[in-house]
């Protein structure tokens, strides 16, 4: 029976002793530790270089710089992020989650629970990414509909034709040119604005 591929992890912890224990625990549980960083400076660049599947951050309390680096990472190269911290006030947790942290665990790290915590963070990350894609698709579809409606209105005005005739003409043009209707709408709007 083939064993599942190991999950590549990037560890961030300024405390070398604590980091060594975490790394060993991860390796014992089948994770591949790619590297350990002392801080989150240039985190997005390091992630693009190393391509970890997951990031684990162990610290006392996330600073503003840590959260800004997490937000930058989340925009550029999102990954599941698990943050273990000593402080757990609701504002800090909210800011961490908004910055892209998938799981925020307070009161330190229990090595016996690490696999379940990482699994939960990965599942939450996948769910969030699916929702994010759906939101982008919905916004794109809405923007396309607005373009199509605007172009249809311009065609109706220019050719003094009813709505259904203008829409059929645009659809026919899209099929003839083998282009999406939204692209045809953009072209119509661009041409009409010049005229």
Image: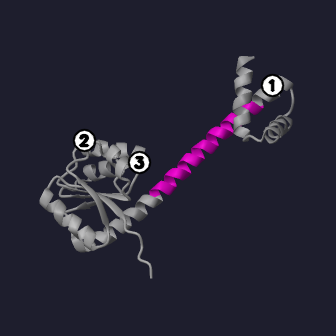
Q: Mark 3 — residue?
A: 77
Judge whether 181 appears above or below 188 on screen: below
Label 1: few (<14), some (14–19) or many (≥20) C-alpha neighbours in 10 Å: few
Question: Label 2, label 1: how many angstroms apart (C-alpha)?
Answer: 54 Å
| Residue 126 marker | none
Q: What stretch is highlighted in magenta?
A: 128-152
Q: Residue at x 32, y 60 (%)?
A: 9
Q: In the picture, which quadrant includes the C terminus?
A: top right
Q: Judge whether residue 123 is colored magenta.
A: no
Residue 128 % position (x, y): 45, 56
Q: Main secondary structure of the magenta part?
A: helix
Please give the name of the residue rendered at 30% of the width and 50% of the height, measured from the top-left corner: 96
Inspect this view and state whether residue 149 appears. no
In three-dimensional space, the C-alpha distance between marks 2 and 3, rounded to whole angstroms, equals: 18 Å
Of the numbered discs 2 and 1, the one sitting upstream in the chain is 2
Of labels 3 and 1, earlier in sequence is 3
Q: Is residue 134 magenta?
A: yes
Residue 121 in view of the camera: yes
Mark 2, mark 3: which one is toward the viewer? Answer: 3
Q: Image quadrant of residue 27?
A: bottom left
- Left or right of 113: which side holds 138? right
Instruction: Classify residue 139 as left or right of residue 116.
Output: right
Counting residues from the start of the chain, the first of labels 2 and 3 encountered is: 2
- Using residue 77 as the reference point, say whether residue 41 is left or right of it: left
Disc 1 target residue:
157
The residue furthest top is: 195
Callout 2: SS:
helix
Residue drawn 33% across the image and 66% down it:
118
Residue highlighted by disc 2? 65
């Amino acid at each position: 029976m083939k064993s599942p591929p190991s999950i590549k992890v990037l560890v961030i912890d300024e405390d070398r002793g604590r980091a060594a224990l975490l790394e060993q625990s991860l390796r014992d549980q089948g994770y591949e530790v790619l590297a350990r960083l002392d801080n989150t400076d240039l985190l997005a660049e390091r992630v693009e270089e190393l391509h970890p599947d997951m990031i684990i951050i162990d610290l006392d309390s996330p600073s503003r710089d840590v959260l800004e680096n997490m937000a930058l990472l989340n925009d550029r190269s999102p990954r599941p992020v698990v943050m273990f911290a000593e402080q757990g006030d609701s504002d800090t947790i909210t800011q961490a989650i908004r910055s892209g942290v998938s799981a925020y665990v307070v009161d330190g790290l229990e090595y016996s629970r690490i696999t379940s915590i990482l699994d939960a963070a990965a599942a939450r990350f996948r769910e969030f990414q699916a929702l994010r894609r759906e939101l982008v698709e919905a916004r794109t579809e809405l923007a396309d509909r607005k373009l199509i409606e605007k172009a249809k209105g311009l065609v109706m005005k220019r050719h003094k034709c009813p709505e259904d005739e203008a829409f059929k003409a645009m659809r026919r043009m899209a099929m003839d040119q083998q282009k999406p209707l939204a692209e045809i709408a953009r072209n119509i709007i661009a041409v009409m604005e010049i005229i």
